[in-house]
Image (cartoon, rainbow, N blue to C red):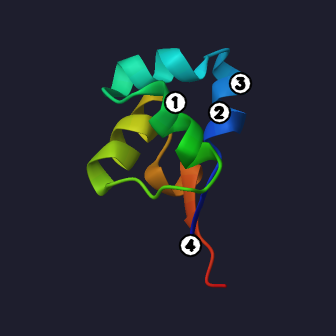
Amino acid sequence: MIKNRIKEYRAKYGMKQEELAQRVGVRRETIGNLEKGRYNPSLVLAWHIARQFQATIEEVFTVDDE
């Protein structure tokens, strides 16, 4: 399972789900589902999200082996 820190980064940058979604070219619901762990992003989407936060993919997304 892939875990993420999207919500934490959004708060740090004062960004709403809708704004992040527009910046990376997805719907707001997709960002919400990512944050809740209901959806795993493609590598390209993960890269675009991390780039919005000036972070690496590994800083935003981690793999939980459980």
Q: Quick check: can you spot residue 32?
A: yes
Residue 41: image location, x then y, percent: 40, 53
Residue 35: image location, x then y, percent: 62, 44
Q: CA distance from mark 4 to mark 1?
A: 22 Å
Q: CA distance from mark 1 to mark 3?
A: 9 Å
At x 65%, y 33%, the residue is 9
In the structure shown, which secondary structural element does the residue marked by tag 1 occupy?
loop
Please give the label number shown on residue 53.
1
Are circles 2 and 1 on residues that touch, CB within 8 Å?
A: yes
Image quadrant holding the N terminus, namely bottom right
What's the residue type where badge 3 is placed?
Lys
At x 56%, y 56%, the residue is 38
Q: Which residue is mark 4?
A: 1
The residue mark sitting in front, 4 or 1, is 4
What's the residue type where badge 4 is placed?
Met
Res. 62 image quadrant = bottom right
**In the rendered image, the vertical position of residue 36 relative to residue 30, given as above or below:** below
Q: Nearer the viewer, residue 4 or 35?
A: 35
Count neighbours of disc 4 (C-alpha within 10 A) and say few if under 14, some if 14 to 19, many if 20 or more: few
Q: CA distance from mark 4 to mark 2?
A: 20 Å
Please give the label number shown on residue 9.
2
